Image (cartoon, grey):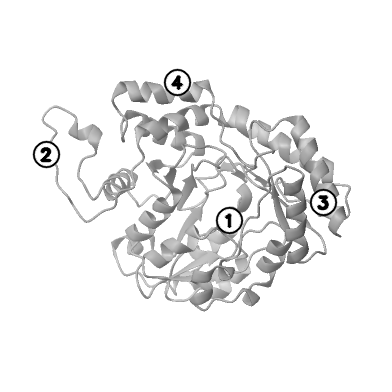
Amino acid sequence: MIKFSPPRIDEKIIAEVTDSLKSGWITTGPKTKLLEKKVTEFCGNKISLCVNSATAGLELVLRWFGVKEGDEVIVPVYTYCATANVVVHCGATPVFVDVNSDDFNINIEEIRKKITSRTKAIIPVDFAGFPCDYDEINDLVKSNEIKSMFNAENKNQKLLGRILILADAAHSMGAIYKNKVSGSLTDISVFSFHAVKNLTTAEGGAIAFNLPENFNHEEVYKYFNALSLHGQSKDALAKFQVGGWKYDILFAGYKSNMPDLLAAIGLIEIERYKSDTLVRRKEIFEAYSIGLGDKKWAEIPLFETDSKLSSFHVYPLRIKGISEEQRDKIINKIFEKEVSVNVHFQPLPLLTVYKNLGYKIEDYPVALDNYSREISLPVYYDLQDFEIEIVIGAVIQSVEEII
């Protein structure tokens, strides 16, 4: 069976993790702090904090910005549940908007229609690693018309003076938009380093801060560092110093720090990410596009334009003119040929929790159409060329058995 997205675990990673075990630093320590610096250098943002998941990172940002009951946060309807779940955790209302038919990303005009005086944040999602239209989103919330609607209720909201753009960049580490790297494209971006991501730490993520100049990023970092450690005034590294045992709890924070054991994996991953990992993933995308491009039923995904370059995280093939039922039959046929595929994602109103909250998939026709025809093909570093050919053959044969 050709797997869908196994992590790349080799001797370099094993050696780095072993070094952490031998060092005695297995929780947050020097390797986590070094990974934060490496993320900032790679992305070109102002400062970064590693956390134990992208989900935690998204929620910490919303909490910091004061998102609460009565507030609204705009979220694309086509995303993983985490993007909306964090809004619910804060007591606020997720406001779903439809997506583009070409790239699966959030539709700017739909955002505009849904902004109200209660909107505190927008969470664009870089679907499959393809960046959203950040210039348009940033310009929208900075326009006088939209800024005049913003109701600032705390210090951070007043300092920003507008809706916060919080990029769900879980898929897009290394993606490029207008010659800038994901993480430096808007106010704050959150990456996922989960086991299936391009760059993994097994579990984990990072918050990339790129706020306007009137924010003190060192102070923001200190606050988030404490927020991720129960509100503790010192992390383990600081407490380890001579006479550094005494600490305070500044506020009721959370437990979402990244340990050094996980950061060790990330240090090897980020070292070879641009020169090796992304190169191989792009080769896989191009091979699929060549192998399937002459099929009239194949809708090849966007992954490179004049202004955008994907991180090549998910290859979302769509089959033209089929129903959801036919798509599911095609997937079953592919699995019968010992090839693993997936679907990204079930639009949120299809899920019980959001269906029960009153959201209706019929209100989001583009997302429903994209979803009903989408099949994600395997993409991972160790996927061999002959296996790519097997995948292509299995897809072609399975589609033509059904349609």
Query: Cα distance, mark 2 to mark 1?
Result: 46 Å
Q: Nearer the viewer, residue 276 or 323?
A: 323
Horizontal placement of 50 versus 27: left or right?
right
Q: Amino acid at mark 1?
A: Asp
Query: Cα distance, mark 2 to mark 3?
Result: 64 Å
Horizontal placement of 354 versus 275: left or right?
left
Pointers 2 and 4 in contact (C-beta within 8 Å): no
Pointers 2 and 3 in contact (C-beta within 8 Å): no
Q: Quadrant of the C terminus?
A: bottom right
Residue matched to label 2:
246
The secondary structure type at the circle numbered 2 is loop
Residue at 62 percent across and 73 percent down: it is 361
Q: Is residue 130 visible?
A: no
Q: Is residue 131 visible?
A: yes
Q: Amino acid at mark 3?
A: Ser
Query: Cα distance, mark 1 to mark 3?
Result: 40 Å
Q: Earlier in the sequence, mark 2 or mark 1?
A: 1
Residue matched to label 3:
398
Circle 4 or circle 3, nearest the eye: 3
Residue matched to label 4:
15
Circle 2 or circle 3, nearest the eye: 3
Q: Earlier in the sequence, mark 4 or mark 3?
A: 4
